[in-house]
Amino acid sequence: MKKSVLYALALLSLASCLGYKELPVEYDYSYRGNFKRYRTFTLMKPLGFVDTTATTELIEKSIISRMRFLGYKQTDTRPHLIIGFKMYADSLRFNGYVQPDIEEWVKTQQVDLNYNPKKLNLKTGTLLIQFFDRRQNRSIWQGYATTYYGSIDFNNQRHLRNAVISILDKYRFWAEGFVEGAPQKETELP
């Protein structure tokens, strides 16, 4: 009996892995980001424009799901983070940065480090997700996946969902107070 339960669990975990293939992703960030202090978010939507395509809805749902998993609350009233995304079907020349791993940088939070730029020539099918700090009015994190790193087919829901998950897996910060179990206040960041 115990062997059959173990086999069933092994088969279940294998089956869940088959639906997700992590893509290699690049990201960079601002040394002014308050990554441990954010609690709320919203998705960036252009004024007067409503995109109801299945692709956009899938990306939005994937972002919302990931942010809620990390303990962030979605709000349209004074959110700490505004999250935007863009799909580039054509090739793209992109400016990125060579930086310390974000999890290592957060331990010291040195703001006087230099941004060492690197030019990237990204091939077709790039997905870019950016996080903006509303209060600072600046981009604080961006992650991108492309055919330069792994194939993204924007017409394939599984490929697109994998791209979003792979990118957001690089943003590993719990909402302030979520892990500790402390009550969350809906106030501004200091």
Image: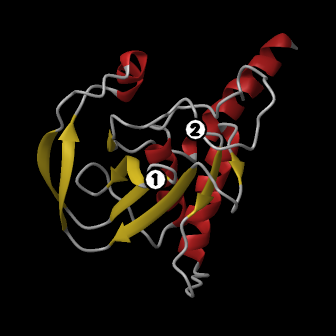
* Pick the front one: 144 or 39: 39
Q: Residue at x 73, y 19 (%)?
A: 180
Q: Which residue corresponds to the image point at 71% horizontal and 57% vertical from the top-left?
A: 75
Q: Residue at x 49, y 68 (%)?
A: 156
Locate residue 127, reporting x and y percent: 38, 61
Kind of residue at disc 2: Cys
Check disc 1 and give the amino acid type: Phe
Up-down relation of residue 124 to residue 158 (above or below): below
> Is label 1 in a helix, a strand or a loop?
strand
Name the secondary structure under disc 2. helix
Q: Residue at x 51, y 78 (%)?
A: 46
Q: Is residue 3 left or right of residue 114?
A: right
Instruction: Give the distance between the C-alpha atoms of the residues marked 1 and 2, in whole angstroms.
Output: 31 Å
Residue behind mark 2: 17
Image quadrant occupied by the C terminus: top right
Mark identifier at residue 142: none
Instruction: Work out which residue is located at the far bottom of the displayed protein and give it.
Output: 48
Indicate left or right for 12 with 14 as reference. right
Q: Which residue is mark 1?
A: 132
Taking depth in this image into account, of 126 and 113 the one nearest to the observer is 113
2 shown above or below 177: above
Crowd band around label 1 with a 10 angstrom C-alpha radius: few (<14), some (14–19), many (20+): many
Q: Residues within 10 Å of mark 2 (few under 14, many from 20)?
A: few
Residue 62 location in percent, x, y? 61, 55
Camera-near label (1 vs 2) is 1
Q: How far from the left and from the top, in percent, is residue 116?
A: 13, 37
